[in-house]
Image (tube, rainbow, N blue to C red):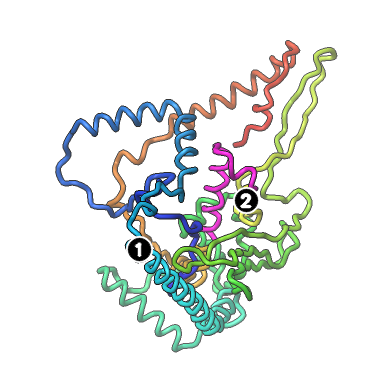
Amino acid sequence: MAEPIRNKRPDLTAPTPQNTPASNAPISSHAQQPGVSSIKEEDIDRAAAASIFAQNPKLVQMIQGRLGSLIGRSSGYIESLPTPVRRRVAGLRAIQKDHSKLEAEFQEEVLQLEKKYFAKFTPLYEKRAEIVNGNAEPTEEQVKAGDDTENHQLQGEGANTESAPKDAETPENVNGIPEFWLSAMKNQVTLAEMITDRDEAALKHLTDVRMEYLDKPGFRLIFDFRPNEFFNNKSITKTYFYQNESGYGGDFIYDHAEGDKIDWLPGKDLTVRVEAKKQRNKTTKQTRIVKKTVPTESFFNFFSPPKPPSDEEDGEEDEAVSDIEERLELDYQLGEDIKEKLIPRAVDWFTGEALAYEEVEDDDLEPGDFEDDDEDDEDDMSEDHDDEEDSDEDDDSGKPKQEAAECKQS
């Protein structure tokens, strides 16, 4: 399906003699690289400049802020053109406006077409859910068609198509397809990175992942669960909203997302963990255990999306704002992946066949992109051990304890 809804920034004036871009244009990952490397004076100059900027991040922020203030400002180039030429430029702008109107109409019609076919897809999704949850069995025609497809793929790979021996320990009365959605999500790379071992116990109860379009541009993701020991919610939703005005090219612009509040059962909140720390009284030398609840990584943080920076924060050039923008972009991309990849082809993610069509290819990765982090793990373990030993020493000496040590996350 076409993907008319994109996470695009508002219209910015393209680089011309009368304005200056705030940052370099993005370089495509498929950009052609030179066949023979060469070293030139300008390359050395660039390397020296890069070194200076790397050592002075505040200088980079200052330059970016200055360049950003120049976007859209006229340098007088257009105004200096002869009157007949300026009239022609104005005429071209009018034509461009008409083109933009047609682009907006095109994107709106694409959205309506998506909704039309989504209504046709919905009955198929409902049949899928019935089979996954054991409420129905596939017809003989469906089984035969699925087997033919699987056998054809196996033969193409030169695999043995003979039936494998059945595991004697596998029960015959399995209901539906256990852990269907958990397995599918763990095969989807961006989602797998969010799922912790603790999350899996809750996601095993996931019965369906659905979506629906809003009356206005936007969509809602719906996660259905069977009763479980973690929360009371039967469904947990997350809604993505778009701005009222279309962006450059008529595309819809992502505005913000809202997630349901999860009604966690006592002591079952997977988005936090309890840290227990031993403290010793300086006078009586008695010890006590202090427990503190701290946030932790979890897939269920997906339902508490980051909030866009306010107007005041947006004007600040600092790492905090940049971090929020990166989290917003990642959050939106995760929603798009669930909407455009996971839901339409859930069975392909469950079997792992969808991985063959992912854009990331091993050929694009260099050996230097990976490193053995066993030493880092050992260092981390050593640091944790040292912190625990230092804790009692600080209490005995009366020195204030480090707050960072209390908030240290695993």
Q: Quadrant of residue 391?
A: top right
Classify 10 Å Cα crowding around label 2: few (below 14), some (14-19), many (20 and above). Answer: some
- Residue 271 percent across, percent down from the top left: 67, 48
- Magenta-colored stretch includes residue 281: no
Q: Which residue does the numbered mark 2 point to in the structure image? A: 306
Which residue is the extreme one toward the left? 36
Which residue is the extreme one toward the right? 284
- Residue 105 percent across, percent down from the top left: 48, 77
Residue lying at 69% horizontally and 42% vertically, measured from the top left: 273
Judged by its main secondary structure, the magenta piece is helix
Residue 167 showing in the rendered view: no
Magenta residues (range)? 310-335
- Magenta-colored stretch includes residue 315: yes
218 and 81: which is toward the camera: 81
219 and 59: which is toward the camera: 59
Mark 2 residue type: Pro
